Amino acid sequence: MRPYILLLTLAFLGACSHPLEIVGEGDILSASGERDCLLEEYQAGADNCKKNYVSEQYQETYYAQPRPGWRFDHWKNYCKNSDVNECSFKTPADIVAEHHGKTMAPLRAVFVEEEAPVANCDRSFTKDDVYIIDLSPDSETRGACGTLSGSENIARCVENKIRTQFSDSQACLNAFEVFVPGTNQEHGDYKQFTQIVSATPGKTYLSLHYAYESTALDDALEYDKGVEDAARALDHLLDALRVKFNAPAVRVYGHSKGSHAVAQLAQRSVHGDVQFYAFAQPGRTPSSYRGRPGYIEKLADNLVVLTWQNDEVKYYTGGDDGKRFPEIWGFPGYVNEEGGGRTVLPMRLDHHNNYGGNYEKRDFPYCATGNKVAMGSTSECRLQDGVRYVPYFWGDAECASTAYTMMEDGRPGDRHYIGNSGPRAANCKDTVSTVSASYTLKYSINIADQDDCKYHMKLSFLGNDIGTNRSDGGSISLSSTRDTYNRTKTGTVRVPYHMVLNWKASMEDVSGRFSKCVNHLGAKSEGYIHDLEVRFRHPETGRSVKRTLIGNSEGIEYLWPLKLAGKNNVAWRKRGGSWDLHFGIPPSYPADALMIKGDTKGGISGEFYKWVHLVD
């Protein structure tokens, strides 16, 4: 075939410098022999490739010569429609002289690997197979890729380290699983991911070390810096994999703060072929990256998220001993932390543990009420042994399969709720149901102005667990115009698996024409709940279950009378009204009750709530 001749005009080429670039492995040779650009020269940044100075008349024909195992694919920027490896230029000297000092778009030769029989790759994932690639710009490790300048140098460094690490299994370098840990302190620790990925042959496992800091990221600015570090490091790694390993199949898993960076990278078109999974996302992650709280969703063609309000462990796993509790107590499984960039919405005590595994209930059972002391001393919260507990999303094979197939199947149906807590319908969908429970409510009422005032209390079992639109249950109501002590009310009520337990007390003026509902001698009125216990059949196992929803000495750490405030170490929060919730150990009867107390006056109230999770 005749060489493809291109007569360049001013629009296509300015004078003086016409760079030559190589993608893949090959050389650019010139008919004159004076403008050759060999692969090694290009990689070294030699002027004959990088500059390729032009003077006088520019008349040259270039040839793309592939290296062994590679073939020429196409030219870029010039000779685009040519199907041969020749590209010719003929530019008059006056045009070259007129544009002295300018640099024009490079002539780029693109080489691709020859199709060859695929070697068998039988590598299976084990924790010893994970290679931690250090892309921290502040790394103190000699030869760390992140300390280099220039994307090409970083990419070449990443390639060399990966090929060296897996020198005995080069055939496995066509598919990667990449882990992005959740904090700078983890230094690439991948063990949190081991339950997510199966032992699939043909996968090479990398974990990203993206920052070199030993200090805790405990405020918003440091959090944002960590996300920035992770995103930059992951961007470099994905670029290196795409360019140096011929665009292999890549899946990326981000955890906690790392998932924030993963969700950011998924938005960039250059990474459109990479599959991203962002899970256990922190509350600070923007909602545009996060999806609806409590669900697994496909937010983009290449992004699946498991959002931050997860259905999982019932105790906080932070701290040196693994069981340190947060200062703001939100048991059973929610903590409401304020300030420091943390979410002010309630969330499970440790949203980081939805990545699989199981354990025995040797430490803490499921407990619907209480405080840190009561967990080890009351009948419901007493330490148990030998009860298998699998509360995680990734601990369920069907749920995990759902997450992976979403990448190909589009957006999921309704209520793919995170966690393995409670019964499920097909395809890992939350059944969003209620159970019929028998209840025993023990209460007391003390009215400062009897006969003229009627004290009302109502306990409602609401199913609107933030973001999940759960079915509401029923309610328990009681009223009295007289002091009542140590009363018991029993019955049956529909109760959601996961609920907001709402407690409202109010005062009604029932006085006649010649009297009025007022504080008697300045005394205020009080309504007490000693405990509320429900019994029901577990909807999946069928066994009889007892839960104490109010009781177990809630607030036992405090001296009486302490009024509920925003950061008290109890699960209750105020919804509205002028009355207050008090808790603690009173000097006299009743010794273990919660109390709603306020002025004796018609038309006033107090309303409080907490989250309760019945089914594990």
Image (cartoon, helix red, strand yellow):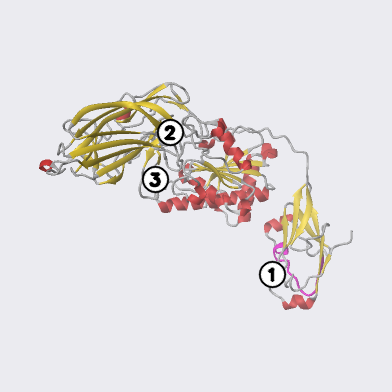
Mark 1 or mark 2, which is nearer the start of the sequence? Answer: 1
Mark 3 or mark 2, which is nearer the start of the sequence? Answer: 2
> In the orientation shown, which residue stands out farthest toward the right?
1
Q: Which dot marks residue 103?
A: 1
**Distance from Cα at disc 2 to Cα at disc 1:** 61 Å
Provide the residue span drawn in magenta.
Answer: 47-60
* Label 2 sits on residue: 313
Mark 2 and mark 3 in contact? Answer it, CB < 8 Å: no
**Distance from Cα at disc 2 to Cα at disc 3:** 18 Å
Query: SS class of the residue under badge 1?
Result: loop
- Magenta span contains residue 51: yes
| Residue 200 screen position, x and y as percent | 63, 33
Given residues 465 and 207, the one toward you in this image is 465
Query: SS class of the residue under badge 2?
Result: loop
62 over 443 or under it: above or below: below
Mark 3 or mark 1, which is nearer the start of the sequence? Answer: 1
Quarter that holds the N terminus: bottom right
* Label 3 sits on residue: 345
| Residue 564 screen position, x and y as percent | 26, 42
Using the rendered image of the protein, determine whether residue 442 is visible from the camera's viewpoint.
yes
| Residue 23 screen position, x and y as percent | 72, 55
Quarter that holds the C terminus: top left
Q: Viewer-nearest of labels 2 and 1?
A: 2
Quarter-of-image position of residue 516 = top left
Q: Viewer-nearest of labels 2 and 3?
A: 3
305 vs 317, left or right, is right
440 vs 466, left or right, is left
